[in-house]
Amino acid sequence: MISVAVMGYGTVGSGVVEIIEKNKKEVGEKSKDEVGVKYILDLREFPGDPYEDKVIHDFDIIANDPEVDIVVEAMGGIDIAYKYTKGALLKGKSVCTSNKAVVAEHGPELLQIARENNCSYLFEASVGGGIPILRPLNTSFTGEHIEEITGILNGTTNYMLTKMDEEGREYDDVLKEAQDKGYAERNPEADVCGHDACRKIAILTSLGSGKTVYYKDIRTEGITQIDKKDFEYAKKLNGSIKLLGLSRDVDGKILAIVAPFIVSDKSPLYAVRGVFNAIMVKGNMVGNTMFYGQGAGKLATASAIVADIVDCALNKGKTIDCTWKSEKAQMVDDREKVFEYFVRVKKDAFAELSECLGIREKITIDTADDEIGFVSAAVSEDKFFEAKDKYSNSMINYIRILDTEN
Amino acid sequence: MISVAVMGYGTVGSGVVEIIEKNKKEVGEKSKDEVGVKYILDLREFPGDPYEDKVIHDFDIIANDPEVDIVVEAMGGIDIAYKYTKGALLKGKSVCTSNKAVVAEHGPELLQIARENNCSYLFEASVGGGIPILRPLNTSFTGEHIEEITGILNGTTNYMLTKMDEEGREYDDVLKEAQDKGYAERNPEADVCGHDACRKIAILTSLGSGKTVYYKDIRTEGITQIDKKDFEYAKKLNGSIKLLGLSRDVDGKILAIVAPFIVSDKSPLYAVRGVFNAIMVKGNMVGNTMFYGQGAGKLATASAIVADIVDCALNKGKTIDCTWKSEKAQMVDDREKVFEYFVRVKKDAFAELSECLGIREKITIDTADDEIGFVSAAVSEDKFFEAKDKYSNSMINYIRILDTEN
């Protein structure tokens, strides 16, 4: 019997309990042992809940019960979640979590504590919800040098951008709809400003490179500046606009960024609509692969946690290791970050700005006769932002362009 | 030091040697030990090849060398490959292969021999080339009941169908091009008749269900009857035509089929073009996920074998098990296989046939005024084939329709 303690009985935590119960046969067979929930830690009471009798309020009960093999951290937040995770690992209990904030902030330390205590710290559910991506990165691309990871990592913003694209609607309008449907929070900042995607690409890149990529070192731009005219231009370029987390290995240094990109309809990422997520991984041998599925949702996320639980059950007393070490990755500086940009500029500044950045293609749309759009030459970030500052009164918007081979 | 013997020094075998050499650092780190190729078994000599001195011609050298931990079977064919695989496993040497024919024919027996000899029989490369799919099925969907697997599993036919769709060309024409480019064999039967896809969906379904689905029990229809008019009709249905391997769990029984399907542009499978493969897996908790990448090619396929090698290296002396057991899965009979069909029929038989099968939608195309197309109601295979026999002189072609939720 493998005993699990679930910390946090909200959406994800209750999903974990539901899957362990509903798919008891599959989980047991795969774990080669029966798996059962012994405790549910939450501040609240749950009168009438079928697992009411398992609810406790004191973490120490879990920490001090030698029967508990695996702890699920589905509490959210950082400080308490980190403290309890560390406490469990120090007692040799494996921890499985969906909490990307804790992973991105404290991942290397918690992984090291797990190694020293013959247990595991697993977080498949922290990136891409139910999409198996961290485990394949760890166990399937073992013969690969990972060259690039590009992902649609946030379902809320992808839902909004899909609506803007398909229905020609404005940002505020689709944000309100996303909030009404429960896809976006009342304070949508974590999603729309790219912070959520940033933590996810930081985790993916750390696993892919084996070194720590700290989320605060990643330039992060959200989608709040995108308007419906941008989509009209994007269509003229046979593309759409997606919020991407992207990282590349550039001669051993890491280029990482979160920003809206124009993605060509030739890319498999183009077809990823609505709340779905997808992650492309490019290895030097395998080429491009893509992993697609629901990036959020109670059962999808819980399913990834249950997969981690089964892995821990099969590896009781051992550490399921990954290559992510605490050594910090060297990041490329802005001179080495080179992209083509789609730029919208007021008519009178077009000649000067396109001269400054170089021009690949000029684009105009019928609905805006006081501005001109163009695709710049490939320029470095420092050069681009210098131009942006200089022409701040004339540049209406800019969006990077994803290289067509992706 | 982990010693590997590579059997078969053709495209895939030489790719394995190349990756082990080129990504030595990554492979060594992930294996927690140095991995080296000790023998290359082939009938031929390779004068001037950098690994010329490793080439041997006698399998017994491998079987009797206790230093050889892992054997790669990249020989192709069935009988000798099966014999050597069995011989290696009986000596406790793990075997990694891309040989889907051997896996589909002898999988359960070889897996059992591996279990009894504390070694592993792994075959990630046998399905989807470089796409990680078997390992995720085994290790990531452990909390799932797998309800459905739907895959574009053959790159050659997907290349041909993509060309027919995008360029409005005929079957013979694109087949010739595929042969000229080396994508299709001179005798293209294994690809175009669906036999290759059939073995792959048999393997996937056996892993997903835990029971043996024998490839000979799967109805298999190829793409040889598809012509360019079919694509004109498909476009009117906002879809395209893809050769799919599909299996479903129907109340514990397995529905499996390989056939061309009309796939709606709302499905992520629609966007899978050219030689790429994609496999959708639907779990009862996670919903739909999709795995995409190069389904063939020297390095992509070899990369999957190297991942298996690393797994064996990390689990020396143990069996990396899967749930695939020798017990045969119960297959649904034709009365329980229900699909909607797109049917092309001569004008004079339209009224009768559409009455017989039921009609959802009538479709006509400008280029064919002597026939009528229609989408039938959902009918069982036995009923459909009864009608097909009855109207054999009037039915021009038929293609199943993939349910839109996929």
Image (cartoon, coloured by chain):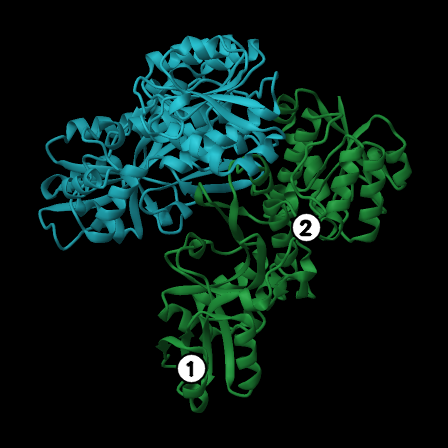
Chain colours: A green, B cyan
- Indicate the position of residue B153 as horizontal and vertical percent values: 36, 35
The residue under the point 54% across, 15% down is: B67
Q: Say which amino acid is labelled 1.
A: Ser
Mark number for residue B25? none
Q: Say which amino acid is labelled 2.
A: Thr
The residue under the point 47% across, 10% down is: B63
The residue under the point 52% across, 43% down is: A145
Have a look at marks 2 and 1 and say if they share a chain: yes
Q: Is residue A278 visible?
A: no
- Indicate the position of residue B292 as horizontal and vertical percent values: 43, 43
Q: Is residue B297 left or right of residue A82?
A: left
Question: Label 1: few (<14), some or many (≥20) within 10 Å?
Answer: many
Which comes sooner in the sequence, label 2 or label 1?
A: 2
- Indicate the position of residue B277 as horizontal and vertical percent values: 38, 40
Task: Identify the residue position indicated by label 1 in the image.
Answer: A354
Question: Label 2: few (<14), some or many (≥20) within 10 Å?
Answer: many
Dividing the picture into quadrants, the one containing residue B297 is top left
The residue furthest bottom is A348
In the displayed structure, B61 sits above or below B28; it is above
Locate the C terminus of chain A and report the quarter of the image it occupies.
bottom left
Q: Is residue B357 left or right of residue A391?
A: left
Q: Chain of mark 2?
A: A
Task: Identify the residue position indicated by label 2 in the image.
Answer: A212
Q: Is residue A191 left or right of residue B382?
A: right
In the displayed structure, B177 sits above or below B384; it is below
Element class at badge 2: loop
